[in-house]
Image: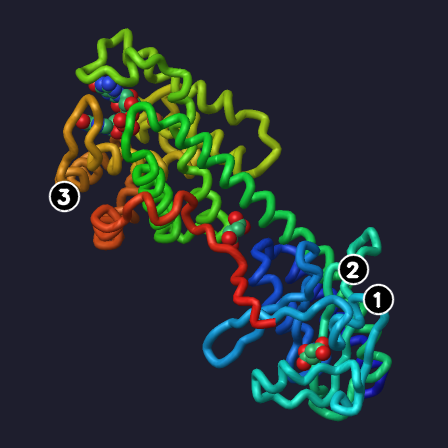
């Protein structure tokens, strides 16, 4: 292949790369994707994406070691990666063991022999360095000038995608915390086991969404947004919410307003997650046959997220003791869900729910709300093995 042909091929790959990475908002997946693409494009044996941790002033990355992912951390200014982060300059080394900036501790740890390294800084649009790309061991000889240019380009494309994903993660983590505080506040009055109920709703909704082949993003959304469905109960007076017996028609009319209060509390949010939560709060008591509240919406007119949460909510409400009713055995609750298919509930949602009966029952039996308040929340591992 001539050099022009080679560059043309790479340009095409670069365009594809830009498109591919721009839609991934999960940071870990994004980093994997980038590493894979960079390796492929530069014909290297490995690629490591280091990100700068401003709190500790270290560069961190996860590397595959055997079957596990281990986090490695390099102090700013140390090693090849640290030098690149500090200087903002490319480093292209043809013989690493002859270079005194190279730190072979990682090689010792992994049993891998690093021969050549090309490392470039990752810079955001404000010119701030957010990390370092390293490609290691060119399969043929060593990395050349063209490789340097390509890696810089990939770096600038990757930087914005990485920042985006980081922003997204931070946002959603602090949102999640707020959400749970709000949700717990809303529900602790009428339920002692608030945390369990919220956790159940979240898990059940996620399982249904998964079975219905919703995208990963949508599954995540529904898991995180569903616990807010009854936030509007904060606006309901104790005399009604905590009434031990059956509500009068008048009282139930008041009770139904929790959907409106909820959608008001969550309205006009900028965050996508809260917008979804708003729809769920507003419409989780709509019925598939149009006989629900607040608007009497029918079928697909009810947002899908709300149709899913409705099944999860009713199943769990039946299985839990309430001040106004004892708990039902899970089998009986399951029968009720089945009977209400096409009436209260979307048959497609019910079908997904029934298919997952075993998994649902297992969660019903084992999940205790103390494990974690925040479902699916897992932090970046920090085992600081440096
Ligand atoms: P919740 O207790 O979280 O119940 C959520 C939904 O689960 C109910 O929505 C209903 O669809 C279903 N559900 C709960 N318990 C039963 C039951 O024993 N039988 C049947 N067939 N379905 C049940 P719904 O009816 O729109 O009620 C919304 C909220 O209004 C309830 O939330 C609860 O906080 C309150 N509520 C409803 N009925 C009464 C009542 O008789 N007394 C009191 N104190 N509160 C009630
Ligand atoms: C470094 O010195 O930057 C670490 C080298 C490596 O990633 O193998
Ligand atoms: C997120 O909501 O995107 C973060 C979930 C995680 O901890 O991976
Ligand atoms: Fe409700």
Residue of label 1: 88
Vertical side of 374 occupied by 256: above or below? above
Task: Kindly indicate whether the residue at mark 3 contacts the one at mark 2 (C-beta within 8 angstroms).
Answer: no
- Give the x, y percent position of residue 26: 56, 56
User: Mark 2 falls on what kind of element?
Assistant: strand
- Give the x, y percent position of residue 165: 63, 53
Which corner quadrant holds the N terminus? bottom right
Point out the tag, 1 or 2, that comes first from the N-terminus: 1
Residue of label 3: 331
Q: Quadrant of residue 323?
A: top left
User: Mark 1 falls on what kind of element?
Assistant: loop
**Residue drawn at x 78%, y 89% as measured from the top left:** 142
Point out the tag, 3 or 1, that comes first from the N-terminus: 1
* Mark 3 or 1: the one toward you: 1
Q: Can see residue 44?
A: yes
| Total labels drawn | 3
- Give the x, y percent position of residue 85: 78, 66
Q: From mark 2 to mark 3, how far is it between C-alphas?
A: 57 Å
Which corner quadrant holds the C terminus? bottom right
Vertical side of 255 occupied by 38: above or below? below
* Mark 2 or 3: the one toward you: 2
**Residue drawn at x 14%, y 43% as measured from the top left:** 331
**Residue drawn at x 28%, y 48% as measured from the top left:** 367
**Residue drawn at x 78%, y 81% as measured from the top left:** 101
Q: Residues within 10 Å of mark 2 (few under 14, many from 20)?
A: some
Q: Residues within 10 Å of mark 3 (few under 14, many from 20)?
A: few
Is 189 left, or right, of 153 in this rendering? left
User: Mark 3 falls on what kind of element?
Assistant: helix
Q: Residues within 10 Å of mark 1 (few under 14, many from 20)?
A: some
Point out the tag, 2 or 3, that comes first from the N-terminus: 2
Question: Residue 129 got which mark?
Answer: 2
Is 4 left, or right, of 29 in this rendering? right
């Amino acid at each position: 292949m001539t050099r022009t042909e080679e560059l043309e091929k790479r340009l095409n790959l670069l365009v594809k790369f830009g498109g591919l990475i721009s839609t991934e908002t999960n940071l870990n997946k994004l980093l994997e994707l980038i590493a894979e693409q960079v390796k492929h494009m530069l014909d290297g044996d490995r690629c490591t994406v280091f990100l700068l941790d401003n709190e500790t002033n270290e560069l961190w990355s996860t590397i595959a070691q055997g079957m596990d992912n281990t986090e490695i951390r390099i102090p700013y200014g140390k090693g090849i990666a640290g030098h690149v982060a500090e200087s903002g300059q490319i480093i292209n080394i043809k013989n690493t063991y002859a270079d005194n900036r190279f730190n072979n501790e990682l090689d010792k740890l992994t049993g891998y022999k690093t021969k050549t390294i090309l490392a470039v800084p990752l810079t955001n649009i404000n010119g701030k360095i957010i990390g370092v790309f390293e490609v290691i061991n060119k399969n043929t000889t060593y990395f050349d000038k063209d490789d340097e240019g390509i890696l810089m380009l990939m770096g600038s494309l990757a930087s914005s995608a990485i920042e985006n994903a980081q922003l997204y993660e931070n946002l959603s983590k602090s949102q999640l915390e707020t959400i749970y505080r709000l949700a717990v506040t809303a529900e602790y009055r009428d339920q002692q086991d608030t945390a369990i109920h919220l956790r159940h709703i979240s898990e059940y909704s996620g399982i249904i969404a998964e079975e219905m082949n919703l995208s990963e993003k949508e599954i995540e959304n529904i898991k995180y947004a569903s616990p807010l469905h009854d936030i509007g109960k904060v606006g309901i007076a104790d005399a009604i919410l905590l009434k031990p017996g059956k509500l009068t028609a008048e009282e139930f009319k008041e009770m139904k307003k929790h959907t409106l209060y909820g959608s008001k509390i969550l309205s006009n949010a900028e965050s996508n997650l809260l917008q979804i939560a708003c729809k769920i709060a507003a419409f989780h008591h709509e019925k598939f046959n149009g006989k629900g509240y607040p608007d009497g919406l029918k079928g697909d007119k009810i947002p899908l997220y709300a149709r899913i949460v409705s099944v999860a909510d009713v199943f769990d409400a039946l299985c839990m003791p309430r001040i106004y009713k004892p708990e039902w055995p899970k089998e009986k609750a399951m029968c009720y869900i089945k009977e209400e298919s096409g009436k209260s509930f979307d048959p497609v949602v019910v079908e997904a729910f029934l298919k997952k009966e075993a998994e649902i029952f297992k969660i019903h039996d084992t999940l205790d709300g103390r494990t974690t308040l925040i479902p699916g929340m897992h932090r970046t591992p920090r085992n600081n093995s440096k």
